[in-house]
Image (cartoon, rainbow, N blue to C red):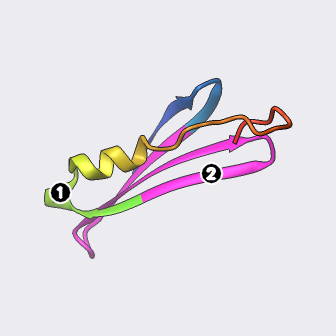
Amino acid sequence: MSQGDISLGPYQGKEIIVSTKERDAIMKSRVYVIGSTEYILQVWTPVPLKDNAEKNKFLKSLNLIQNSQGVDL
């Protein structure tokens, strides 16, 4: 298991990578806590596809917007 610090705009988060021998797979998660809400993006892939472009595109797909009350989502 490994983890590292990441950010999404002004918000800090963690990236967590876990590999399993039993499933021959890798799980990569990105976790952000914004206000009182926790956002988790998670992908499991077989080890040979660990650097898959679609997986990386999904993990980078979370965007923040402001709602009518000025709160980031």
**Of 33 and 61, the residue lying toward us:** 61
Q: How many C-alpha atoms fall within 10 Å of the one at disc 1: few (<14), some, or many (≥20)?
A: few
> Which residue occupies the extreme bottom position in the image?
22
Q: Which residues are magenta?
A: 14-42
In the image, residue 28 lies in the stretch drawn in magenta: yes
Which image quadrant is residue 57 in?
Answer: top left
Percent position of residue 25, x then y? 26, 65
Q: Is residue 21 left or right of residue 12?
A: left
User: Where residue 49 is drawn, which disc sits there?
Assistant: 1
Q: Amino acid at mark 1?
A: Leu
**Of 57 and 3, the residue lying toward us:** 57
Kindly identify the residue that appears in the image at 55 percent across and 29 percent down: 7
Percent position of residue 39, x then y? 62, 51
Q: How many C-alpha atoms fall within 10 Å of the one at disc 2: few (<14), some, or many (≥20)?
A: few
Q: Amino acid at mark 2?
A: Tyr
Return the disc, 1 or 2, that comes first in the chain's sequence: 2
Percent position of residue 63, x then y? 55, 38
27 relative to 71, above or below: below
32 relative to 25, above or below: above
Kindly identify the residue that appears in the image at 61 percent across and 36 percent down: 64
Q: Which residue is mark 2?
A: 39
20 relative to 4, above or below: below
**Of 64 and 22, the residue lying toward us:** 64
Under circle 1, the secondary element is helix
> Which residue occupies the extreme front position in the image?
68
**Of 42 and 25, the residue lying toward us:** 42
Q: Is residue 17 left or right of residue 13?
A: left
> Which residue occupies the extreme right position in the image?
69
**Does the magenta stretch mainly form a helix, a strand or a loop?**
strand
